[in-house]
Each structure stands twice: as structure tokens, then as C-alpha cells.
Amino acid sequence: MKTLSLAVTTTFTFILSIAAPALAQGVGGFSAGPGLAPAQEHSVPAAAPPATTPPATSPPATTTAPPVEQAAPPAQTPEEINDEDQGYETRVISYKKSPVFTQQRQFGNARLWVLDPGYFIVEQWWTGEFGTPSGAPAGEKAGQGHRFQTEIEMGVAKHVQVDIYLNYEFATDANGGNWQIAPGGHTGVAAEVRVALPDYYGQVFMNPTLYFEVTSQYYNSPRVETRLLLGGTMFTPRLLGVVNFAFERNIFRDSTSGIDYEIKSEWGANYDIIPGWFRAGAQATFGWDGHGTIDANGYSQIFPVAQIGPQFLFSLPNQYFRLLGSFVFGLAPQDAPYTAQLIASCTF
């Protein structure tokens, strides 16, 4: 029995020494001692994944080409940016503002530029003619004429101004009696449109602007007028000069006044003596005027026109109220010797 027990013990010990390493490897370790396993398997746990990047001290491998940069999208225009998914936002189209002096009437005869959008002016005119023309028939004494005009000027767009006004005329005959050219003195209604050719004031020399007007005359044919407006500052910002070239006539021939042509140039210059308060200068008119007359054969007559005289413009500093006045002398035989004018205006 001792021999059998020793044999069994020896056999069991031999089997256990062979199986122990395999069992230890199955549970992730080596219980048989360090001599049974490689040294590196002690430093790296079996559960940790193998390293996929080189050590931090090694430079990165450059075995692949660098990434290609994508081209930047083309820049969008301001219009595209404003139009792209803006919901209910409103786009505001701005304009370059015109100088202050272009937004008020500078002369009674000549015009300049247009009102900026959103500006409104209300004006009340009075024009009086006095004296007997030197070319009147001997012994004839002329009467006096008075014209009243109420005008509304409106800047309706960046390049466009529209004016509407009512005309009233009264007269005194050679014997001192008063009479009306039309019932109640109301002689007609007029509409005027100005269109500026440049995009903004100062873009083109002399700021060319086109002018069109149609006037109803209750006692006569309707009348049309067209002008080319030119002007701007000269030599110094305080000196202003303008010139208008005008053509005017009745649309239809009338039995008493014919076509009644007017072909004139209107000139003006003033200086800003007290900035924001007071400007003074002169205005003049040269050309031809039919004065509503016809010859014995019924054809329209036409006579030279030459008028010149001083003018002034008084403004409150806020520009809301202005008073423009002029007094011109008629130098041609058919001109009224004296013509006075006052224009009061308010800006809104």
C-alpha cells in the first residue's frame, strides 16, 4: 500500500506541474513564476488594446499626402446677402443727400436741381408789374397786373420732383379800374415735373435737370413749357450760379393771343452773406416773348426781352421758413418797366 500510495502521489504531482501553466494562462496570469513567461507580457496587460500611434516623442508618420484645402465659396454681393432668407426684414435703399441750398428756391425766375425724396415745400407767390412799356403806342397808358400762385413742391423719388400750383390773376386798367382775367381771378392749374439726370448732386458738371410743365388757362389754350436747368457753386461754396434755357407756348392757336411763344434764358447768382440766414445777388432774363399779341393778319408777334435786378433770400436757421424777394427792371421796349416779386415758403 505504501508503494501504491507513493506512486499515485508521484503521478499526481507530475500531472499538476504540467497543467498549472496552461491553467494560469487561461485566467490571464502565470502562477508558475516569472521564468515561465516572456518579460514583455508582464509590462502590458493582456486586456489592453495594442498601441496604434507611435510614442509621443516620435514625429508623426508622413506616409499619406496632406489634405487638400477646399476652395472658399465666392463672396456674395450685398443684394444677395439681403435677399437670402431674411424673413420679413425690409431693405432700405439709401441716396446721397443734396446740399441744403438745393432744397430751397434760390431765385424767382430760375430753378435748380430737385428736392430729395420725402421733402415738401409750400409756397405763396405774388408778382406785380408796374408802369407803361416804352414801346407802347403813343398816349397809351398801361395798367398794373398782379399774379398770385399757391404751390406745393414734392420730392417723390431720388431723381424726381413734382409740383402742383394754382394761379390767380388780377389787373388794374389804365383808368384805375379793377378787373379779373377769369371769374374769381382763378386762371388755371399747373403741374410741373423735374427729372435730374445725374445720380446725385455734384456727379456731373452743372447738375443738368429736365423740367416739364403744363398749365391750364381757363380763358385761353393750355400752355406747355420745357427747360434745361443748370447750376452749382462757383469759385467758393458760398457763391451760387444758375442758368435755365426755356421754351414755352400755347398748345392751340387762340384768336386773340395766337400761339404766344416764349424763348428765354433765365440767369441768377447769389452769395451766402450770413451763412444759414441771408443770401443776396441778382437775377436776369434775356430772350423773346410774344406778350400775347398778334399782327393784323392774325400771326403771333414776338419781341425782345431784357430784365435784370437785385434779389435776396432770408431764411430761418432751421430752414423751415424763407422769404425770397426780387425787383427787376425791364430794359426792352415791350417789357413792364418794373416787376416786383415776393415768395414765402415753408419746408416740411
Image (spheres, helix red, strand yellow):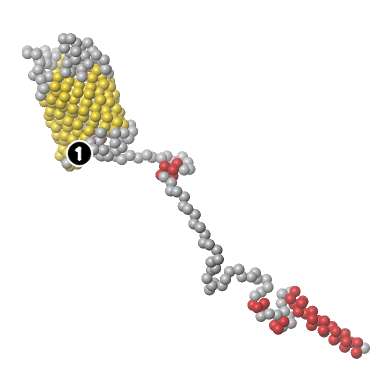
Q: Position of 2 compared to 122: left or right? A: right
Which of 214 and 40 lies nearest the eye of the viewer?
40
- Write the residue at 20% across / 21% down: 262
State the residue in front, 188 or 247: 247
> From the image, which quarter does the N terminus lie in?
bottom right
Q: Quadrant of the C terminus?
A: top left
Which quadrant would residue 225 be assigned to in this image? top left
Q: Residue at position x 19%, y 13% from top?
A: 299
Q: Can residue 314 be seen in this view?
A: no
Judge left or right: residue 154 versus residue 178: right
In front: 272, or 332?
332
- Numbered marks: total: 1
**Furthest residue toward right:** 1
Q: Is residue 200 left or right of residue 169?
A: right
The x and y percentages for residue 19 are 79, 79
User: Which residue corresponds to the image point at 58% horizontal and 69% vertical from the top-left?
Assistant: 53
Residue at numbered disc 1: 233
For badge 1, the amino acid type reads: Thr
The image position of residue 96, as x and y in percent, is: 31, 40
**Quarter where residue 183 is shown:** top left
Residue at 29% across / 36% down in the picture? 198
Image coords of residue 109 (percent x, y)? 19, 28
Query: Quick one: label 1, few (<14), some, or many (20+) residues within 10 Å?
Result: some
Q: In this view, does 324 lie above or below 140?
A: below
Q: In the orientation shown, which residue stands out farthest toward the top? A: 296
Residue 94 x, y percent position in the rendering: 35, 40
Residue 184 in the image: above or below residue 12: above
